[in-house]
Image (cartoon, rainbow, N blue to C red):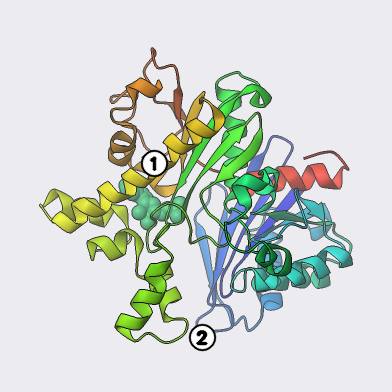
Amino acid sequence: MKVLVINCGSSSLKYQVLNMEGEILMAKGLVERIGMDGSVITHEKEGEDKWVNEVPMETHKEAIKQVLDAIVDPDHGVLKDMSELGAVGHRVVHAGEKFASSVMITPEVMAALEECTDLAPLHNPPNILGIEACQELMPDTPMVGVFDTAFHQTMPPESFIYAIPYEYYTKHGIRRYGFHGTSHKYVAQRAAELLNNNLDEMKIITCHLGNGASVSAIKYGKCIDTSMGFTPLEGLVMGTRSGDIDPAIVTYIRQKENLEQGQANEILNKKSGVLGISGVSSDFRDIEAEAEKGNERAQLALKVFAHKVRFYIGAYIAEMNGVDAIVFTAGVGENDYGMRDIICNNLGNLGIKLDVVKNRVRGQEMIISRDDSPVSIILIPTNEELMIARDTVQIVKGLPV
Ligand code: AMP
């Protein structure tokens, strides 16, 4: 089955076409500046140069139309016509408590996603627009929703309930949801495969360290805890997000800095994290370059980031009463061997022994722990699109995911 994977943002849209017989990537692309001047589609047929086409795209429907045209383009396309496409898999950020796994999109599912819009006001509306546009342009093609929150729905209440008045949970749905679920699920499955072990018998800690970052505790194949919470702001220090802070800081800063409604949120989401500490950049490459030159705030930002990852690793080892494998993925996790080194340093008493030579690798699947390390440390490039396509095929065939 050939599957189109769509990840629709407010003004941009990423897509991939995969042939799921052999799980082969056929084409991928990006639409930028939807609804703005200078909208552009960059399409890349596997093994060929990028094809850039500047064309006005006022709406998400027009953007999807350009994607479909590119896919069947006689020169740059990969399908003869759209009927070759077996299904479309849509990434949706928030499904609240409604879905614990991927589902076929029906009018009831769309209504449920609309209800979750309050929980993800920036992400769900464009996700919904993308689904509606595809439904209009491909009314006979099955559509599947794959949710970032779904994998974390197995968390027990003691992991997801906040210690605030309980009625905020029942009335407003305030609880830990967790994000990056598709990535955590993919790398956990892959870790079990690489180690020739059964996922259902393993305790795994997955560290998705990108611009957004989260850690998950996966016990016997199920997520039992994750560091992101009600929103993707909680947990680790991130590129521009603060992660965990004392909630009292918010009211205090608002008062001291005379901040308007919403400004504190903006500061915690866009001006904090390693950017906020270092004052240099949200990109670890820039911060590391500055740190090497002796910039103390850049050095501190890296230390605070690593400290928080170690903090969660320790907590999750306690929660699971042990760990068999620690996985690193996403931009920082896959590429930044210096950061992996700091995170895993001096954890030998927990059975975590990094092989500093094997660790000097970027972006490739590899076991990077020492041969005598009781805990396997693995580098696994994430592949959320493949996971979405896999789930899509399973759902269309009526099989479990
Ligand atoms: P992601 O959100 O997964 O795309 O990750 C993006 C982040 O990965 C960037 O902001 C960088 O901080 C980081 N990154 C990418 N490549 C490298 C690298 N070679 N060394 C250090 N950090 C990197």
Q: Give the residue type that dot 2 points to.
A: Asp
Give percent across and percent down for residue 74.
68, 60
Q: What element carries label 2?
A: loop
Measuring 69% from the left and 69% from the top, which residue is drawn there? 172
Give percent across and percent down for residue 183.
58, 45
Question: For the residue carrying disc 2, how many other residues have a C-alpha within 10 Å: few (<14), some (14-19), or many (20+)?
Answer: few
Question: For the residue carrying disc 1, how many other residues have a C-alpha within 10 Å: few (<14), some (14-19), or many (20+)?
Answer: few
* Position of 236 relative to 115 (above/below): above
Give percent across and percent down for residue 267.
38, 73
Q: Quote the CA–CA distance across marks 2 and 1.
A: 45 Å
Give percent across and percent down for residue 7.
63, 61
Measuring 73% from the left and 57% from the top, which residue is drawn there? 97
Seen as rendered, the residue at the extreme top is 372
Along the line of sight, the residue nearer the viewer: 277 or 74: 277
Return the mark for residue 37: 2
Q: Is mark 1 on a helix, strand or loop?
A: helix
* Residue 168 image-quadrant placement: bottom right
Along the line of sight, the residue nearer the viewer: 1 or 53: 1
Return the mark for residue 311: 1
Measuring 87% from the left and 62% from the top, which residue is drawn there? 106
Measuring 31% from the left and 82% from the top, which residue is drawn there? 257
* Dot 2 or dot 1, earlier in sequence: 2
Quadrant of image for the C terminus = top right
* Position of 247 relative to 380 (above/below): below
Q: Give the residue type that dot 1 points to.
A: Phe
- Residue 223 seen in render: yes
